[in-house]
Image (cartoon, rainbow, N blue to C red):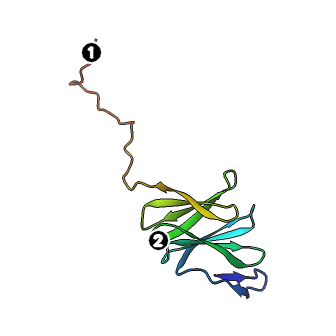
């Protein structure tokens, strides 16, 4: 992962993470960067002040996009190859605390329109 100075657009530092990083998210409250590593199915945790990896958390197949929840102090990583989401604690040390299974089926709407016509019958 490259850290780039936004004024000069020059690389400040290269931070070695696992293979094929696919998504990254910054968690400002803890000053940490989280990187989803697709090939290794892990999440790298980077200290934003020291610019170094401080933990590698196991995820599921093809870890990718990340989002944070500052109220619950957690980071969520979508696992593209497994239809799941890994939940990571942001405490010290960072650790995997759970998983949410995602569904790929379309939800059916409860609200359907029925044609009303001369053949419609109602009970009285």
Residue 106 lies left or right of residue 27; in this view the side is left
In the image, residue 15 sits, relative to residue 71, either above or below, namely: below
The residue identified by callout 2 is 62
Q: Residue at x 20, y 25 (%)?
A: 119
The picture places residue 35, in percent across and down from the top left corner, at 60, 72
Q: Residue at (75%, 80%) from the top-left corner?
A: 6
Query: Residue 105 got which mark?
Result: none
Lower sequence index among marks 2 and 1 = 2
Where does label 1 land, which residue? 123
Question: Which SS class for mark 1?
Answer: loop
For the point 42% across and 68% down, the residue is: 81
Instruction: State if disc 1 and disc 2 touch (CB < 8 Å).
Output: no
Of 34 and 114, the residue lying toward us: 34
Apparent side of residue 87 relative to residue 111 in the rendered image (left or right): right
Residue 9 or 45: which is nearer the viewer?
45
- Dot 1 surroundings within 10 Å: few (below 14), some, or many (20 or more)? few
The Cα–Cα distance between marks 2 and 1, rounded to whole angstroms, is: 55 Å
Extreme residue in the top direction:
124
Label tally: 2
The quarter of the picture where the C terminus appears is top left
- Rendered view: 19 above or below 81: below
Left or right for 34, reference 79: right
Picture quadrant where residue 96 is located: bottom right
* Above or below: residue 105 compared with residue 118: below
């Amino acid at each position: 992962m490259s850290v780039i100075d936004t004024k000069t657009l020059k690389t400040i530092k290269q931070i070695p993470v696992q293979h094929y990083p696919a998504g990254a998210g910054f968690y400002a409250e803890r000053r940490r960067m989280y990187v989803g590593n697709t090939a290794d199915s892990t999440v790298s945790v980077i200290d934003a002040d020291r610019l170094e990896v401080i933990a590698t958390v196991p995820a599921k197949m093809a870890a990718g996009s990340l989002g944070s929840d500052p109220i619950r102090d957690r980071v969520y990583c979508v696992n593209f190859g497994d239809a799941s989401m890994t939940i990571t604690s942001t405490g010290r040390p960072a650790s995997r605390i759970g998983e949410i299974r995602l569904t790929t089926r379309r939800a059916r709407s409860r609200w359907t329109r029925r044609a009303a016509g001369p053949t419609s019958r109602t009970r009285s």
